[in-house]
């Protein structure tokens, strides 16, 4: 109950950032509107049910991210069933040469530092639990490789295309 109340408070505090409102970039707007905050049911939602509402919410986001990005190779992690539902051709390994799509927890500095040199302009890294460590999130945002960032409160999404103007979006998710 306490967790659900916190979710409502976070959602209400970010209500003016719903569904891409205020985002001027057409690319970033489309990403927020049709990947992050897509509300239409997808084909795999019935098989991706979970008892915990937050796990289900994040899992469905990760499913949509894999569906959008279509990664060939990813690191193994706890969200593997969601990644695989979004892209059936993804192969999971213990290490990768180039990051296409990856997940790292905010307090896992070793994995983060290992991923950074493997990121290119097409890489996307999802950082879990950014609300637990605001300082750690700011350090990740200040990394020289990071271009576009999305703060969804429960997780963050980092893009590494430095040709685009760097921007940090706060999104109501």
Image (cartoon, rainbow, N blue to C red):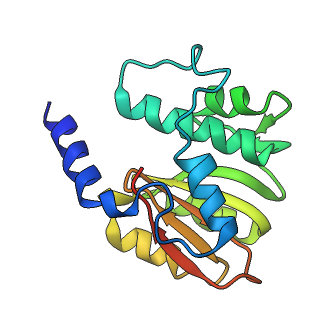
Q: Is residue 38 left or right of residue 161?
A: left
Q: Looking at the image, which residue sits at the far top?
A: 47
Can residue 114 be seen at all in this image of the molecule?
Answer: yes
Rendering coords of residue 84 (x, y %): 72, 29
Report the side of 55 relative to 98 (left or right). Answer: left
Can see residue 159? Answer: no
Between 127 and 110, the residue placed more toward the observer is: 127
Identify which residue, 30 or 70, lies in the foreground: 30
Instruction: Identify whether 69 is placed above or below 89.
Output: below
Rendered location of residue 55, percent (x, y): 43, 32
The residue positioned 70% from the left and 26% from the top of the image is 85
Tell me which residue sits at (20%, 37%) in the image: 3
Image coordinates for residue 151, horizontal then vertical, percent = 45, 63
Q: Is residue 136 left or right of residue 85?
A: left
Residue 114 versus residue 19 in the image, above or below: below
Q: Position of residue 167 (x, y in %)?
A: 56, 79
The quadrant holding residue 148 is: bottom right
Q: Residue at x 63, y 66 (%)?
A: 28
Marker count (numbered):
0
The N terminus: image quadrant: top left
User: Which of these two is toward me, 71 or 109?
Assistant: 71
Q: Name the residue rendered at 69%, 66% in the picture.
A: 27
């Amino acid at each position: 109950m306490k967790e659900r109340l916190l979710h409502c408070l976070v959602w209400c505090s970010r209500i003016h950032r719903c569904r891409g409102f205020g985002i001027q970039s057409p690319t970033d707007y489309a990403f927020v509107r049709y990947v992050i905050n897509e509300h239409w049911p997808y084909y795999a939602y019935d098989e991706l049910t979970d008892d915990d509402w937050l796990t289900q919410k994040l899992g469905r986001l990760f499913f949509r991210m894999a569906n959008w990005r279509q990664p060939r190779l990813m690191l193994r992690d706890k969200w593997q069933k969601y990644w695989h539902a979004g892209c059936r051709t993804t192969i999971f390994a213990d290490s990768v040469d180039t990051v296409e799509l990856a997940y790292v927890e905010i307090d896992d500095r070793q994995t983060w530092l290992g991923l950074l040199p493997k990121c290119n302009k097409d890489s996307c890294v999802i950082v879990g639990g950014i609300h637990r460590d605001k300082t750690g999130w700011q350090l990740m945002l200040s990394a020289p490789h990071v271009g576009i960032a999305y703060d969804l409160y429960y997780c963050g999404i980092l893009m590494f295309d430095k040709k685009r103007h760097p921007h940090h979006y706060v999104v109501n998710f």
